[in-house]
């Protein structure tokens, strides 16, 4: 029952987001009781609070809220807006320093993506991600006086309470696929567009590939760093900006890196989140059976943030294995996960072999069979 209520609440939350992002009237059933506190938890979990609040104001839903809840939503949205303009002030200072030192600044994710929306300040951004076209060491010296900390693919610096990530590479570089995509993206940065604010942004074609790799990185780590609905919406919104003459090129890029299966999954998720027709961007065959599992991984906190007990040991191990079985479908969407895919294949093969030997149907677990 609780799961069904949460699914209904997610749909209402997304309808409010669509109203804010797409500029249309939200369609909310009048006979539904809305748990606004629970919705705020969900909105914060998926970085949607600003958009949800904007959607509430469009439909005058704020008038339906008890006074204290209305105040809580308003203050939270106001705090997010203040954070956006504070980040913008910090970014403007960085851009000025770069300009004075012959550094070009490419803005990644966050504030760069906020420009795709009617009200940029409503898209939540936690930090500022920059790429200095390979001159990251000069940036560390000029921008941050060498007071930086290396964290995987970027250097981290704090300026006036805002975290700034100075990227060495555009994406992670841990696998052959990532290195190939990185090389391709670097070859396209000459076509980056300079905004009126003085920073550069990736072209829409390169941005689609960049966002796809970003989503795959989160799909790879659903427990510690899961995908947020905000990232799915970003992907769908940027996809809609592609011009007709760019579609064939995007298709060829996706085929080149063998990402067609992953691309189609996220197009379907974007279509679900935004409730818009994205059929013109569906270039490949889609595996419908994996969509419910992907949706569950996206919104089910028990899968996104599982809680395991510490005793008894064998029970915890079984819980962990059961959880991994629930999300194993995603391995075929991750070109970098061959080893784990093989391990699961061996596991399935051995289970099926044992079931065949003892006459257990394939849709019955061995654990249940031995219990009976």
Image: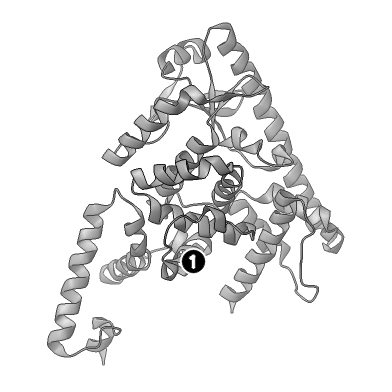
The one nearer the camera, 145 or 288, is 288
Image coordinates for residue 136, horizontal then vertical, percent: 43, 18
Q: Residue at x 16, y 85 (%)?
A: 356
The one nearer the camera, 200 or 53, is 200
The one nearer the camera, 126 or 269, is 269
Image quarter in which the N terminus is found: bottom right
Task: Give the total number of marks visible in the rendering.
Answer: 1
Image coordinates for residue 155, horizontal then vertical, percent: 43, 25
- Could you tell whether 34 is left or right of 297 in the image? right
Q: Residues within 10 Å of mark 1 (few under 14, many from 20)?
A: some
Image quarter in which the C terminus is found: bottom left
The one nearer the camera, 253 or 135, is 253
Q: How is the image coloured?
A: one colour
Residue 146 visible in this rendered orientation of the protein: no
Judge whether 331 appears above or below 30 on screen: above
Which residue ends up furthest to the bottom in the rendered image? 372
Judge whether 34 appears above or below 175 on screen: below
Which residue ends up furthest to the front in the rendered image? 245
Image coordinates for residue 45, horizontal then vertical, percent: 58, 53
Residue 192 visible in this rendered orientation of the protein: yes
Which residue ends up furthest to the left in the rendered image? 357
What residue is shown with label 1?
296
Judge whether 201 appears above or below 287 on screen: above
- Could you tell whether 231 is left or right of 326 in the image? right
Q: What is the quadrant of residue 284 in the picture?
A: bottom left
Q: Residue at x 87, y 60 (%)?
A: 63
- Could you tell whether 330 is left or right of 99 in the image? left
Q: Secondary structure at mark 1?
A: helix
Q: Residue at x 77, y 45 (%)?
A: 75
Image coordinates for residue 196, horizontal then vertical, percent: 68, 22
């Amino acid at each position: 029952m609780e799961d069904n209520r949460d699914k209904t609440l997610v749909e209402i939350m997304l309808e409010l987001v669509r109203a804010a992002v797409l500029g249309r009237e939200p369609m909310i059933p009048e006979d539904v009781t809305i748990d606004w506190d629970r919705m705020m938890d969900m909105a914060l979990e998926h970085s949607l609070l600003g958009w949800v609040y904007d959607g509430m104001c469009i439909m005058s839903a704020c008038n339906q809220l008890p006074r204290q809840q209305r105040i809580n939503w308003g203050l939270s949205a106001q705090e997010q807006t203040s954070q956006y303009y504070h980040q913008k002030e910090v970014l403007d200072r960085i851009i000025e320093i770069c300009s004075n030192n012959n550094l070009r600044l490419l803005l990644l994710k966050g504030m760069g993506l906020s420009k795709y929306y009617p009200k940029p300040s409503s898209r939540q951004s936690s930090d500022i991600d920059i790429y200095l076209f390979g001159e990251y060491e000069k940036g560390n010296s000029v921008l941050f006086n060498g007071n930086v900390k290396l964290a995987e693919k970027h250097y981290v610096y704090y300026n006036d309470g805002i975290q700034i990530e100075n990227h060495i590479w555009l994406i992670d570089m841990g696998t052959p696929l990532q290195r190939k995509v990185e090389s391709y993206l670097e070859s396209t940065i000459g076509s980056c567009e300079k905004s009126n604010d003085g920073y550069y942004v990736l072209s829409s074609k390169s941005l689609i590939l960049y966002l796809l790799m970003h989503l795959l990185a989160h799909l790879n780590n659903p427990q510690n760093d899961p995908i947020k609905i905000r990232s799915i919406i970003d992907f769908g919104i940027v996809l809609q900006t592609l011009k007709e003459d760019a579609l064939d090129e995007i298709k060829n890029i996706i085929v080149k890196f063998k990402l067609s299966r992953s691309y189609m999954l996220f197009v379907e998720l974007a279509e679900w989140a935004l409730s818009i027709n994205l059929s013109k961007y569906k270039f490949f065959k889609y595996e419908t059976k994996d969509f419910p599992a992907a949706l569950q991984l996206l919104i089910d906190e028990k899968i996104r943030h599982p809680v395991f007990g510490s005793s008894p040991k064998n029970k915890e191990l079984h819980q962990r294995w059961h959880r991994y079985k629930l999300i194993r479908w995603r391995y075929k969407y991750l070109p970098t996960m061959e080893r784990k895919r093989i391990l699961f294949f061996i596991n399935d093969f051995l289970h099926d072999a044992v079931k065949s030997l003892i006459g257990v149907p394939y849709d019955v677990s061995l654990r249940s069979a031995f219990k009976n």
